[in-house]
Amino acid sequence: MKVIVIGSGISGATSAALLAKEGHSVIVYEQHEKIGGITATIEQDGYRWDWGQMIVPDLSDNEPGRLVLEKLGISEKIKTIKGYRENYFPDFRIRKPQKFKGIYWRKEYFKELFPEDAKGIDKYYKIYNRIHDLTGLFNKPGLLAKLKLFLKFLPIMGKKNWSAQQLMDYCFSNKKLQAVFIGILADYVASPEVFPGLIIPIINAESQYDERVPLDYGKHEHRSSWTFIENGCIELINAIVGVITKCGGKIITNMAVSKILIESGKGKGVITSDGKVHEADVVVASGGAKELFLDLIEAKYLPNDFINTYINNLFTTESVFMVHLGVDYDPSVHQNGAALCYYYLTYDINESIKECQKGIYHEGKDGFLVYIPSVHSPNMAPPGHHAVTVYTIAPNNLINGNWEDKKEEWSEKLLDIAEKHVPGLREHTKTKIILTPEDFKNRTYLKHHAFGGTVPHLTIPPPPHKSPIEGLWFVGAQSETYGGVIGGMTGADNVVKMMLKEMNSKTTKQTFKSFSK
């Protein structure tokens, strides 16, 4: 089978590697000069920074991401490091204690800060444990696991359509405590009024805040790990791409796809930006949903209900404004030694999200994060130096300025705010890179850059992997497995499984017909 893959990000590369390993003829077209999309690493003056995701779930032993690596035969090449993140709020800071205080030390800390919500905190953590048990059971095969999954879900079935805000109101009266758990939605640029409530415990796993929290304890199911990839996400891309080339696949950079060829309702290949036609049995497309279904394919080939359901109402994140610094001191001393710290400077998370969606950039006043990858991966900076990323959410299309004209000014404003919490950043800077939403658009070939891809929403579904066009599959951050490194990998794995199952089914039918004749 001849396969064309559009894009060499984590989902496109994983799809290509899995298919090449199965013996299929695979060619990947990448519009940029460098592979990896935003699962890549930037280098300058001996410093290295990641474009995209920082702390990654489900990449430890027997977890979904690791299982894909094992299937590709490259598990030993990808090393992860246990880590944690700190959270700063205007009135308090959630800091990992020097001496481990148990699995639920945060729970007890919240009761000290918000005694009026002590009962609600207990209610939340009861739901938390149930949700994480469900997640563990979901990844287990077998009928018994499915039965346990159903029984475990029954007590919270009535809450399955709750929004994050409803869950917060059910558990907590204090808005500051609510902000602790819904603050992460700022990254998604998704209002707690539309974000599914039962996902909140998953994206607030206790092991994110203290790497000493065990993932297996008591009678509970395994909890997902949260780790950093040693030496950056490019290690993952390089290992996966190595499988593609080793198995005879090809990767063509500086080559965009300008059109997908459709004939009798079936994908037949692509036209590349140099005007050449390339035929294929299957096309696997990653990247933007609107770019794929409205630009590379004419709407006349797609059912109206598909366009209306999945494309016209596509719900994605906004972009980011990112400043990368190379410094000659250790700024992690201001973050309790943590590589990653979120600084929430407002408790009104919903208002900040809504402003961003309207095109208003907050200039850092609502919050930002600081990530120092060289804390866990010293090779990402020269000896005695550190690579630092300061970033915050930002709208794609501004109503209060222009990214190119304002980027220097806004970089200085963001560093002004950051230095109130991490002193010395400017004084010790040796090199700097500023990335605006325009840079991310160019890197990803998107009209609207969505840093986190599609986002879980109570009423708007993401586009499915299987398109209405035979032989055309959709993977990546804007597909049904949403954004993130592991979502891209597992989504690609699911697509390849479906594709091969479909192909085997057709072969069986053809064989049966031939035998019948």
Image: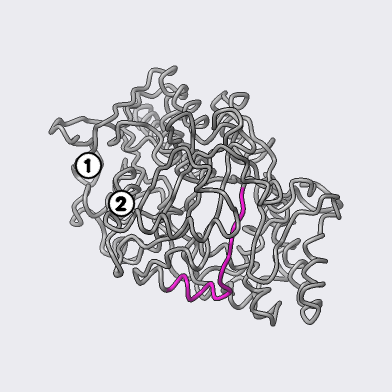
- Whether residue 401 sits left or right of residue 422 in the image: it is left
| Relative vertical location of residue 179 with respect to residue 94 in this rendering, above or below | below
Determine the residue located farthest toward the left in the rendered image: 275
Residue drawn at 79 percent across, 65 percent down: 107
Task: Tell me if I can see residue 416 in this picture.
Answer: yes
Query: Magenta stretch: residue 346 in it?
Result: yes
* Residue at figure coordinates x 35%, y 46% from the top left: 287
Quadrant, the C terminus: top left
Q: What secondary structure is marked by label 2?
A: helix
Q: Position of residue 397 (x, y in %)?
A: 30, 63
Foreground disc of the pair 1, 2 = 2
Question: Which of these two is toward me, 133 or 343?
Answer: 343
Q: Which mark is residue 260?
A: 1
Q: Position of residue 223 (x, y in %)?
A: 72, 49
Disc 1 marks which amino acid? Ile
Residue situated in front as seen by the camera: 11 or 37: 37
Mark 2 crowdedness (10 Å alpha carbons): few <14, some 14-19, many ≥20:
many
Q: Circle 2 is placed at which residue position? A: 438
When the figure is inspected, residue 235 is found, relative to residue 481, above or below; the finding is above
Q: Nearer the viewer, residue 331 or 192?
A: 331
Residue range of the region highlighted in magenta in the rendering: 340-354
Magenta span contains residue 26: no
